[in-house]
Image (cartoon, rainbow, N blue to C red):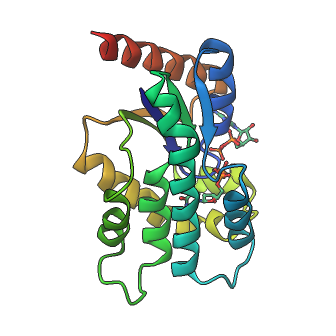
């Protein structure tokens, strides 16, 4: 089973993902951008304010392809629980925002289209919900994607994704204390696993 964690920068995904290591030690924990050289290339683009946004999309997508073949698909074939800190929805939300106003007419549809031929949809996605102001403040605005106005566009893209597939998403209020958010997500993962095994 593939469960992904999504949300704005600073929503608390990594805090939750780390806590899940203790509550669900049997799972395969992974993330995007990955630790591979493809992920290194992605991180160079994230840190370059002048990076071409279409080129950046393809770097993220290349990293995703390698992530699928090296980590996600083999673990799923072994019937493992895979928990990924960010996954394809991050592209649909962030790169659609980064490419709004570009030559692409419908950036989100385009990005979904290039993924659809090869990606593996998550079985469930936990969306950690915080407002863009909280997200920007918590993340410290260290890169081009962490500005409040940009994150507001990303947030509305996530809302479009949730509206289109409400059955896949589980929304968790990320403005609660870390303890409450962690307990809630651990409970959600247990429920999803139980439903998956039915
Ligand atoms: N529920 C929370 N309430 C307040 N601060 C939080 C909460 N969860 C995480 N943080 C803090 O916010 C910052 C970003 O958290 P992090 O887990 O790295 O978020 P993300 O991976 O979504 O960017 C960190 O300093 C973290 O300690
Ligand atoms: C995976 C992914 C991340 N990003 C952005 C979100 C972050 O600003 C940055 C790095 O991701 P990440 O390391 O997960 O940052 P954070 O823990 O702060 O959420 O890359 C995209 O724009 N598209 C993507 O597909």
Picture residue at 33% right of the left edge, 11% below the top: 197
- The quarter holding residue 41 reads bottom right
Image region (quadrant) for ligand 2: bottom right
| Residue 12 visible in rendering | no
Q: Nearer the viewer, residue 140 or 38?
A: 38
Q: Position of residue 154 (x, y in %)?
A: 47, 62
Residue at 30% from the left image edge and 36% from the top image edge? 168
194, above or below 156, in the image: above
Relative to residue 95, is residue 28 drawn left or right?
right
Q: Nearer the viewer, residue 20 or 197?
A: 197
Is residue 127 in view from this perspective?
Answer: yes
Picture residue at 67% right of the left edge, 61% below the top: 38
Residue 61 position (above or below residue 4): below
Q: Is residue 15 left or right of residue 185?
A: right
Q: Residue at x 62, y 37 (%)?
A: 30
Count of numbered badges drawn on the protein: 0
Which percent across, then down, holds residue 61? 51, 63
Q: Quadrant of residue 76?
A: top left
| Quarter placement of the C terminus | top left
Looking at the picture, tell me which residue is in the foreground, 43 or 77.
77
| Percent x, y of residue 34 | 66, 50
What x and y, as percent, mark residue 69? Answer: 52, 47
């Amino acid at each position: 089973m593939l469960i992904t964690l999504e949300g704005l920068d600073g929503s608390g995904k990594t805090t939750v993902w780390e806590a899940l290591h203790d509550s669900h030690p049997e799972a395969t924990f992974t993330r995007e951008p990955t630790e591979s050289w493809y992920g290194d290339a992605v991180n160079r683009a994230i840190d370059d304010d002048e990076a071409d946004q279409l080129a950046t999309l393809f770097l993220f997508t290349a990293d995703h392809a390698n992530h699928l073949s090296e980590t996600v698909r083999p673990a799923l074939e072994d019937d493992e629980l895979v928990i990924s800190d960010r996954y394809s929805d991050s592209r649909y939300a962030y790169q659609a925002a980064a490419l709004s106003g570009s030559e692409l007419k419908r950036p989100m549809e385009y990005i979904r289209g290039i993924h659809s031929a090869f990606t593996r949809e998550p079985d469930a996605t936990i969306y950690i919900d915080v407002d863009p102001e909280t997200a920007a403040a918590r993340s410290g605005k260290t890169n081009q994607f962490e500005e409040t106005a940009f994150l507001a566009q990303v947030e509305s893209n996530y809302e479009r994704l949730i509206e289109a597939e409400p059955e896949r998403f589980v929304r968790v209020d990320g403005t609660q204390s870390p303890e409450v958010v962690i307990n809630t997500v651990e409970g959600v993962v247990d429920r999803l696993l139980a439903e998956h095994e039915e």
